[in-house]
Image (spheres, grey):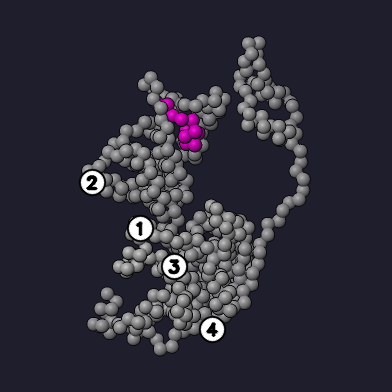
Amino acid sequence: MIKHYITEFDAKIYWDIDAYYVEDKVQEAGMFFRDYRKDLVFGPTFPEIIPTHIEDRDARIHTYATPLKVNQANLVGALLEKVPAGESWEETVVILPDEQMLFPILHTLPEQVGKVNVTMGYPVKNAPVYSFLEAVLEMQRFIKVEDGRVLFYHTAVKNLLSSVYLKSVNPGFAEKLLEEMQLLNQIHIPVDRLAKGGSLYQLIFQKLENDRLFPYLTQLMETLAEQLQEEPLQRSYLYQCFKQLTRLKEIFAGQDILSINREFFIRLFRQVFREVKLPFEGEPLLGLQVMGVLESRNLDFKRVIICNMNEDSFPPAGGLNSMIPFNIRKAFGLPVQEQNDSIYAYTFYRLLHSAEEVHMIYTTASDQGKAGEKSRYIQQMAVELGRKMEEEVIFIPIDQQSPEPISIEKDEEVLHLLDKYLLDEHGFSETAFSPSALSVFWIAG
């Protein structure tokens, strides 16, 4: 389409590029542009002299190594506190390759940050309402029927009773039932006992047939939406889940397979819904800018703070979700991981075009069996740019004080509680010590 406008209407193209990665034949960030320069239509549109923004700007580059992932939020807050008073916050951006860092960052912002613009998608899988829906479906896998009575496994019931959604509806009932389950050491809880909690309890705790899965979740989401009237963020998460559920239902309806296996439905629910993201949209001309990697494309900032500058985070881990082998994809011009790497590399170096101050934070802790390795971009800048980079290791202060011994005075109330463990004349007690509880008591004592 762009070629058509160039050839037919003499359209002009303005290339946002830099000589650092375009002229270097092995620099991955310029792979697409080097191909475009060889093109018969795109080639003549390139400027005769490629700009040298990165070299001319000579930005101050700082790298920070933190021992834990969550320490990055505190460090970002400390860096923002050093921003000179009176400077426009719109010139500062915080880049988050890992969306899970969004709320920790927002909670550690200094007081002088008046307004914040968040431009990124936050995974619904991290929302409490999604965890609740997943726990409801998980409960269906461990339902037992004895003598016509429907019984629910205690672990699934405890997870749901501990959620804020059931506690807020009938807090006294949830706490009393949890105490009763622990006191009597119940393994299975009958449905009639759970139904006494109210209409929401009756809706959640029921045995579902395969053809009732879609209507059940639809009704549950609508009920939760009414309950979350004063929580717009949670309602937004719920709305995204509801849209995805409706889309999934329409797909199955088009295939005439509304009745599906429950186990397959649960697996499909997890796989599909964990990819759903809630888009945050704000005012780009006001306040501190917080955004994901791809949202920062073609934007200029004076101060750039990038979190999670670890390999497999920025750039993200390699591997495309495709059943077509790499050689076939390469031969037929289909997208391969090399092109994906080039996109992220260009997005990173594009941030250096106008930056005067760059802060890159990475963690040294291993995550899911992977060592905390700094991003290849940091290594490339140190070797290829030849730029002096200030490196700093952030340490966590350790409290060397010895803990105070735990001592509980045995007053009448404590002694009365301990009476439950005493054997009566028949050799029975109201309750008993478990091996793990006895072990904890011995270690604590």
The label on residue 255 is 2
Q: Where is residue 49 in the image (x, y as percent from the top left)?
A: 43, 88
- Whether pointer 3 and pointer 1 mark residues with C-beta atoms closer than 8 Å, the reply is no
Mark positioned earlier in the residue sequence (4 or 2): 4
Q: Which of 85 and 391 is in front in this view?
A: 391
Mark positioned earlier in the residue sequence (1 or 2): 2
| Magenta segment includes 224 | no
Residue at mark 4 to residue at mark 3: CA–CA distance: 25 Å
Q: Which quadrant of the rendered structure holds the C terminus?
A: top right
Label 4, on which residue?
A: 56
Label 1, on which residue?
A: 322
Q: Given the image, on which type of amino acid does mark 3 rest?
A: Asp
The correct choice, above or below, for 279 with respect to 213 in the image is below
Q: In this view, does 17 lie to the left or right of 38?
A: right
Q: Given the image, on which type of amino acid does mark 2 rest?
A: Gln
* Residue range corresponding to the magenta coloring: 150-160
- Of circles 4 and 2, which is in front? 2
Q: How crowded is mark 3: few (under 14 residues within 10 Å), some or many (20 or more)?
A: some
Q: Is mark 1 on a helix, strand or loop?
A: loop
- Of circles 4 and 3, which is in front? 3
Label 3, on which residue?
A: 341
Helix, strand or loop for the magenta stretch, by majority: helix
The correct choice, above or below, for 117 with respect to 178 in the image is below
- Whether pointer 1 and pointer 2 mark residues with C-beta atoms closer than 8 Å, the reply is no
Q: Where is residue 377 in the image (x, y as percent from the top left)?
A: 53, 70
